[in-house]
């Protein structure tokens, strides 16, 4: 009986570790996504600065402006693509974590209820030769 209870408690701890692992993975993926977004933003910001600088003297900078505008559009499209991918990955990570946590919590609850049920039945394991009440 005690060994069964210890096994259930160990399983609860294992599930808690799985929850922690899922949450750590979400954090790692979120940080990687934020880094990717930051990296994608740099060329976008640089292209925007070039475009802004090129707009001032129109007559002299017409070619630069077109190049900068093209670079800006490419960078903006890339930024939006990366942003959409990161949003999708973050959503997937959140859903995966939520699913893992929900499953682990459900299993923890089931195991806790089983422990409680066993403890309420007494110390004898199921099928043992425990004294039984006589029926007269």
Image (tube, helix red, strand yellow):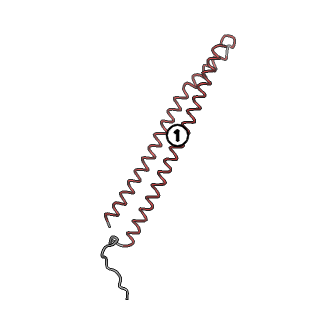
Q: Residue at x 33, y 70 (%)?
A: 125
Residue at the image point whose x is 49% and y is 33% from the top: 35
Q: Is residue 10 left or right of residue 101?
A: left
Above or below, 32 against 123 in this view is above
Taking the spot 30% from the left edge, 76% from the top edge, the residue there is 129
Relative to 126, 42 lies left or right: right
Q: Quadrant of the N terminus?
A: bottom left
- Mark 1 lies on a secondary structure that is helix
Q: Is residue 40 above or below residue 108?
A: above
Residue picked out by circle 1: 89
Measuring from the top left, give residue 52's x and y in whole percent. Answer: 64, 20
Rendered position, 5 above or below 91 = below
Q: Which residue is most to the bottom?
A: 136
Residue at horizontal 63 percent and vertical 14 percent from the top = 64
- Identity of the residue furthest to the top in this view: 60
Place residue 77 in its image quadrant. top right
Residue 114 shown left or right of residue 99 in the figure = left
The residue nearer to you, when weighing 100 against 49, is 100
Q: Nearer the viewer, residue 107 or 16?
A: 107
Please state the horizontal and vertical placement of residue 93, each as a whole percent of the image.
50, 43
Looking at the image, how many numbered discs can be counted on the residues? 1
Dot 1 crowding, Cα within 10 Å, few <14, some 14–19, many 20+: some
Compared to residue 77, the image places residue 20 above or below, namely below
> Residue 48 placed where, x, y %?
61, 23
Q: Quadrant of the C terminus?
A: bottom left
Residue that sits furthest to the right in the current view: 59
Choose between 3 and 58: the one closer to the eye.
3
Residue 127 is situated, as x and y percent measured from the top left of the image, at 33, 72
């Amino acid at each position: 009986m005690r060994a069964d209870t210890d096994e259930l408690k160990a399983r609860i701890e294992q599930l808690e570790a799985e929850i922690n692992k899922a949450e750590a993975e979400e954090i790692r993926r979120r940080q990687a996504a934020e880094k990717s977004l930051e990296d994608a933003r740099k060329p976008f910001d640089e292209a925007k600065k070039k475009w802004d600088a090129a707009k001032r003297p129109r007559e002299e900078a017409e070619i630069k402006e077109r190049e900068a505008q093209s670079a800006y559009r490419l960078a903006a499209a890339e930024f939006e693509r990366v942003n959409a991918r990161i949003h999708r990955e973050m959503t997937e990570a959140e859903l995966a974590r939520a699913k893992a946590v929900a499953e682990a919590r459900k299993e923890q609850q089931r195991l806790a209820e089983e422990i409680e049920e066993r403890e309420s039945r007494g110390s004898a394991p199921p099928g043992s030769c425990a004294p039984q009440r006589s029926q007269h």
